[in-house]
Amino acid sequence: MKAARTQPDGAAHRRPRPATALPPIRPPNPPHPPTTTADTAVADTAVAGQTAPALPGASTMTSRALRTLTVLTATASLCATASTAHAAYAAQDTGRRTPGIAAAWARAWNGTEPQALGALFTADGTYTDEAVGVTFRGRKEIAGWKARAGTLIDNVHVTIRTTRLDGDRITVRAVYSGHLKGAPRPFAVPMTTRLDLDRNHCRIAFDQDDYSLAAVLAQSGLPAGWTPPAT
């Protein structure tokens, strides 16, 4: 009979234990700076969808830039209709960039409000139509000339082709068109207009229109000696 093999006490019941996974090592959270009253105000304003107020420590450069932008915007709005004309004093062809005052002058002629034309002039401004041989002085008379043209001509229209800026003067080359009431045909003739501006380049001090009255009458199918009816 063979003797039974003996093992150390408890050896038969021992099992290898799996290695226990160590928890990952996480770096400590960085310290948070203390929250100030100003930080809370900025956060509350951002939540409300508003612009955050400037903090006492805001950049000086940013404040200067904002002030500069405000001044530039205010200055540009003082004379918006003539900003392009005021930008240069050397003679130059402006091409497609029509000076604001000249564009406003054309819009006034193409519109139906006589006062819109008069308002573009200085209080003592003058308007001369060389073809007809008349001169008007002051905003009221100039507005009256526009009203008179409306009673004689249907569809009065000024189409600017080119402009030339020379100091305080704008030379406009345009097409003057319309239909004399009672005439067989409409007309469209070239016109050159001289606009002398005031020293601020905001209003017109002098206007001189030059076109061929003979061409207007010929295109309209009217005799050379035709004159408009008296008012």
Image (tube, grey):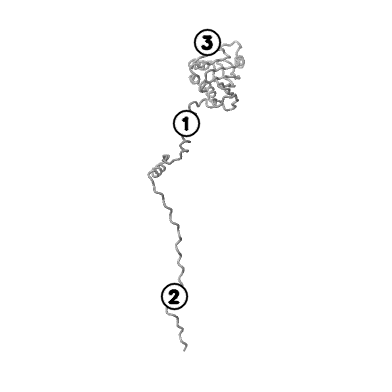
Determine whether 80 is above or below 62 in the image. Answer: above
Nearer to us in this view, 132 or 74: 74
Q: Do the residues labelled 1 and 2 touch (CB within 8 Å)?
A: no
Earlier in the chain: of badge 1 and badge 2, it is 2
Question: Which mark, residue 105?
Answer: none
- Residue 87 visible, this orientation: yes
Q: Which amino acid does label 3 sit on?
A: Ala
Marks 1/3: CA–CA distance: 53 Å
Which type of secondary structure does the marked residue at label 2 adopt? loop
Residue placed farthest to the left in the image?
37
- Residue 161 visible, this orientation: no
Q: Mark 3 points at which residue?
A: 230
Q: In which quarter of the image is residue 221?
A: top right
Q: Name the residue under label 1.
A: 71
Q: Measured from the top left, where is residue 47 in percent x and y?
A: 41, 43
Q: Are marks 1 and 3 in contact (CB under 8 Å)?
A: no
Nearer to us in this view, 71 or 140: 71
Q: What residue type is labelled 1?
A: Val
Give left or right: position of 125 versus 213. Answer: left
Earlier in the chain: of badge 1 and badge 3, it is 1
Question: Which mark, residue 14?
Answer: 2
Marks 3/2: CA–CA distance: 131 Å
Residue placed farthest to the bottom in the image?
1
Which type of secondary structure does the marked residue at label 3 adopt? loop
Q: What residue type is labelled 2?
A: Arg
Identified at 45% across, 71% down, the residue is 17
Question: How many numbered circles are shown?
Answer: 3
Q: Measured from the top left, where is residue 34 in percent x and y?
A: 39, 48
